[in-house]
Image (cartoon, rainbow, N blue to C red):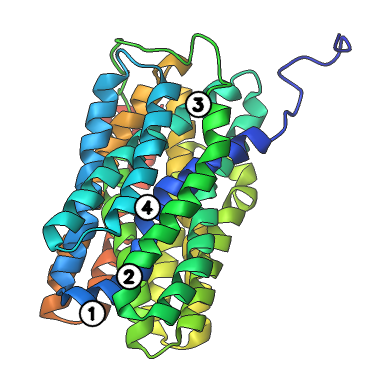
């Protein structure tokens, strides 16, 4: 028995379950989405893709995210979050392998679309499973949420350590080997989160047909939408920018690993903010951090600036969804969190679908720098919207009461 002075509310449970579930973010985001930037230069050379076509392939992935978020929101009326989480993770692994067998823009588009569907299921439901797992330990929820989402940093770093050397050996024609390696890594990385998902029990891990209480969340929704459109531009084209500036693949890999390290460290850097600050302000601050990271390589082209840019950008990137998860936990019952995360993921994925193609269009008519500048402008806007919404009276559309 526990000592009388120790209640479940005051204990500090292990963060290892959050880390295990977070490997799903490594698969769904680090491998399936962001590693595309590493393979993109080789695929552009092999297929002769324009920037717009390259952006379209990431848009196809984001459209899959839209479909996955919408279908996930609907399916959660009948399926448990752990079931949809597991199905999405398995689908993501399968499509990574399938991408390596595609030989046309159409085939690649289908693969990226299906990958997005699976990733949306795993990402949205994984955040809800964290809430269920730590529902008796509210003081640990913020850091546990950050640990889950920052798992993407592991995927970013590991993909850089494996994909770049593979392409350095095989050349651009070996782009398919990169996807097969990613598929293998994703399969290995899925074992722990699948095990953790099926260990989550209780009524909160159940289907729900109840309506979402979305009152007061408009500014956070809009800010999250704009953030999605802006951050994905950096993640799509930053590696291509490094290549255009003549950096070796070794330096490109190092910068990519630094970005992943920033993501992995971010929940510990933001630990107190996630616990004590209003989540709307944390969302605004995280967007501001990514804005600073995104403009640095445009203001200064040195290697040092690129390294610092990647680290700062990584520190802010996954605190945005972490802050949204904390906001939803404060705004609705635990049993509706999976649906709430799915709804916010719908909005996020629409913005994510618009960003790469819009920036690619800008890049084809200007330069890659102007495409990245467009993304930075969106990140600046995403900083202001939730901040203004929080400061305004609730009756004027803000969330502050």
Which quarter of the rendering shows the N terminus? top right
Residue occupied by mark 4:
32
What mark, if any, has residue 337 been given in the picture?
none
- Dot 1 crowding, Cα within 10 Å, few <14, some 14–19, many 20+: some
- Dot 4 crowding, Cα within 10 Å, few <14, some 14–19, many 20+: many
Residue occupied by mark 3:
129
Circle 2 — which element? helix
Q: Is residue 47 above or below residue 98?
A: below
Kindly tell me whether residue 137 is visible in this rendering.
Answer: yes
Circle 4 — which element? helix
Q: CA distance from mark 2 to mark 4?
A: 14 Å
Q: Residue at x 76, y 24 (%)?
A: 11
* Label 3 vs 4, first from the N-terminus: 4
Kindly tell me whether residue 355 is visible in this rendering.
Answer: no
Residue occupied by mark 1:
45
**278 or 91, nearer to the observer:** 91
**Residue 196 picture quarter:** top right
Circle 3 — which element? helix
Circle 1 — which element? helix
* Label 2 vs 3, first from the N-terminus: 3
Residue occupied by mark 2:
175
């Amino acid at each position: 028995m526990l000592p009388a002075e120790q209640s479940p509310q005051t204990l500090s449970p292990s963060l290892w379950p959050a880390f295990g579930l977070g490997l799903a973010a490594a698969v769904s985001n680090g491998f399936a989405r962001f590693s595309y930037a590493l393979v993109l230069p080789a695929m552009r050379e092999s297929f002769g893709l324009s920037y717009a076509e390259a952006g379209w392939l990431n848009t196809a992935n984001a459209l899959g995210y839209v479909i996955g978020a919408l279908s996930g929101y609907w399916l959660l009326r009948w399926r448990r979050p752990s079931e949809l989480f597991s199905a999405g993770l398995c689908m993501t692994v399968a499509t990574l392998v399938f991408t390596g067998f595609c030989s046309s823009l159409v085939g690649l588009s289908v693969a990226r679309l299906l990958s997005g569907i699976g990733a949306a299921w795993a990402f949205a439901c994984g955040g809800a499973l964290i809430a269920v797992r730590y529902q008796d330990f509210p003081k640990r929820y913020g850091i546990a949420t950050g640990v889950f989402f920052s798992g993407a940093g592991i995927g970013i770093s590991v993909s850089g350590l494996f994909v770049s050397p593979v392409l350095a050996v095989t050349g651009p024609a070996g782009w398919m080997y990169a996807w097969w390696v990613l598929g293998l890594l994703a399969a290995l990385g899925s074992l722990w989160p699948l095990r953790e998902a099926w260990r989550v029990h209780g009524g909160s891990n159940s289907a729900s047909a109840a309506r979402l209480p979305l009152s007061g969340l408009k500014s956070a929704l809009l800010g999250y939408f704009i953030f999605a459109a802006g951050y994905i531009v950096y993640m799509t084209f930053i590696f291509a920018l490094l290549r255009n500036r003549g950096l070796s693949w070794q330096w490109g890999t190092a910068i990519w690993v630094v970005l992943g390290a920033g993501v992995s460290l971010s929940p510990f850097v933001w630990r107190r903010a996630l616990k004590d600050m209003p989540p709307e302000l944390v969302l605004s601050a995280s967007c501001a951090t990514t804005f600073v990271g995104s403009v640095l390589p445009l203001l200064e082209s040195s290697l040092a600036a690129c390294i610092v840019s990647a680290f700062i950008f990584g520190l802010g990137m996954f605190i945005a969804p972490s802050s949204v998860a904390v906001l939803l936990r404060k705004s609705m019952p635990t049993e509706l969190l999976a649906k709430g995360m799915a709804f916010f993921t719908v909005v996020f994925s629409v913005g994510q679908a618009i960003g790469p193609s819009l920036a690619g269009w800008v890049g084809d008519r200007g330069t890659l720098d102007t495409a990245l500048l467009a993304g930075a402008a969106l990140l600046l806007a995403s900083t202001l919207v939730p901040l203004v919404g929080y400061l305004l009276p609730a009756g004027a559309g803000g969330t502050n009461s």
